[in-house]
Structures are given as structure tokens and as C-alpha cells.
Amino acid sequence: MKLKFIGLTCLLLLSLKSFSQNKNFYIFICFGQSNMEGNAKIEAQDTINVDSRLRLLQAVDCADKGRIKDNWYTAIPPLARCTTGLTPGDYFGRTLVANLPKKIRIGIINVSVAGAKIEVFEKDTYQSYVANVPGWMKNIIAEYGGDPYSRIIELAKLAQKSGVIKGVLLHQGESNTNDTLWTKKVNGIYVNLIKDLNLKAKKVPLLAGELVNDDQNGACAVMNKIIATLPQKVPNSFVISSKGCTCSPDHLHFTAEGYRLIGKRYGETMLSILGYKTTELVGQ
């Protein structure tokens, strides 16, 4: 009887170990509005030679692509909803896998809502914002169960069964242009993420990208002055430059080339935080 008990205990420990976190599987949460969702058309170079070490935790069902939500896939774009385009997350991830040791895998979670203010991600007050958004935006929000923040948490907790959350990527602000409370709102969301996922802020940086820059006549470039102050509100945060990142004719969204460049900058910043240097260039 005693030997049987020991045997069962060993089996239980082996079972628990098989479902434990892989410390070499780095998970990154991406959220924001249309530029993080991905607006530019995905080109051939963006879908070929995607390293299988770069993974996507699917946020919504995409039957036409053979993807089911809550499952891991090789991170071939789109990384957000089924009909979205190229996102900073694509070349962020590619830059990391190209420059990190082969034993390390990268996992991407992307929950973004085109056109939405940062308020759509506020844990306790999002309902009042969502109640007044246009129908097309409500349809996007509905794909995330009506509550984008909660969907981030659901996916992140699922991801934590496989790996370790290493950072949060944000690209948002066009709909909050000139909002001097933006940094406070972002901090509130970040603090909730850290708390709800049982993380340590010192170990999970927040990377926030600038909007289309002045040098591209960005329609909301003035917001970059507010984004620049984010590290004053969130100590472990970093602002990613959009200088030189080409944009579409609306001067709100990046071109595919622009997404590749700002994505690489997100990646280079994260590599530096992790203690690595960029030794291999990825896609131009």
C-alpha cells in the first residue's frame, strides 16, 4: 500500500511538471487600437519564413484560416482579428527570435480595437465608454466577449500555463489625442494587468509606440508629446520612436514598411532590456 501511494505521488508530480511554465517561452501582451490591430496590407514577405519559435495565442475564431481561439499557432499574420493587417507585433516577434538563443520561444497575445479610446481597456469603467461607441466598434468588441480587458486576462492566464509573461506592448493614442490624462489611464490599466496576472512590475516592462510622426505629417503627431511623458507615470516603461516610419495617405496608419520598422524598434528595445544586442537584421 505504501509503495502504491509513493507511486501515485510520483505520477502526480510528473503530471504537474508537464504542465508547468517553460521559462524559455517568453509571452508578450499587445493591445491598443488600429495600428496595433494592424492596418496595412500583409505582403508576401510577411508570411514566408516565419520561425516556428514565434507563436500566436489566437484571440478569436478564424475558420477561414483554420485557427480556433485559445490555441497556439505559428505567428503568421494577421496576429489580431481575422481580417486585420500587419502589426508592430509581427516584426517585434521576428526581431526577438532572430536574436535570442534558439532555446527561447516567443508568444504573442494581441487584443486590439480599431478606433477605440484607451478607456475601452479600463477594467471597471469600460461599460460606460462602450455604451456610446458606434455599431461597427461594438462588433469588434463583441469578438472579445464584449470586454477587451477581460479577454486579455483570459488569454494571458492561459499563456501562463505554458510560458512566462515578459512584457506588454501598447500602441494607442490617436483617439485620445491631447488627452492629458492619458498617461494616468494607461498606468491604471498596466497596474491592473500586473495585479490580475500576479506579476512584478519591475520584471514586466511596458513598451509604448509613438503615433505617426511629425516627419510624416502625422495627423495625431501632437499626441507624441504626451506619450513621451509616460515613463514619468510608469517607471518601467519605454517609448518607441516612430521617426522615419512611413504612413498611409490618411497620415494615421503606418504602411507595411512602417510597421516593419517600428516593430523592429519594439524588438530592439526589448532585447536591450533582456540584456541582448541586435546582431541579426530582420526584413526591410
Image: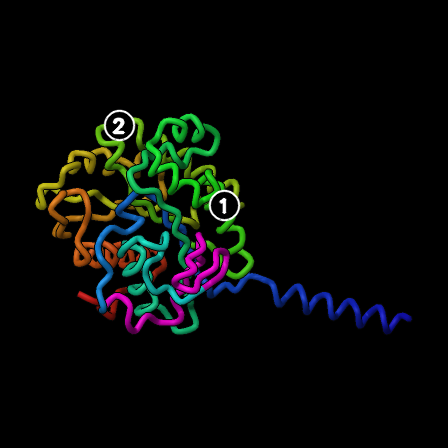
Badge 2 or badge 1: first in the primary sequence: 1
**The one of 260 and 142 positioned closer to us in this rendering:** 142
**Residue at image location 35% in from the left, 71% down from the top:** 51
Determine the secondary structure under disc 1. helix
270 part of magenta stretch: no
> Looking at the image, which residue sits at the far right?
1
Left or right? Give the position of 73 relative to 280. Answer: right
Q: Quarter-wise, where is residue 236 in the image?
A: top left
Q: Position of residue 253 (x, y in %)?
A: 19, 46
Report crowding for label 2: few under 14, some 14 to 19, many 20 or more residues within 10 A (C-alpha): few
- Tell me the magenta residue range: 45-72
Residue type for callout 2: Asp
- 248 up-or-down from 128: above or below: below
**Residue at image location 62% in from the left, 68% down from the top:** 18
Left or right? Give the position of 131 relative to 155. Answer: left
Determine the secondary structure under disc 2. loop
Mark 2 — residue?
179
**The one of 71 and 218 positioned closer to us in this rendering:** 71
Q: Report the quarter where the N terminus lies.
A: bottom right
Q: Position of residue 278 (x, y in %)?
A: 26, 65
Task: Say if residue 283 shows up in the picture.
Answer: yes
Mark 1 — residue?
153
71 part of magenta stretch: yes
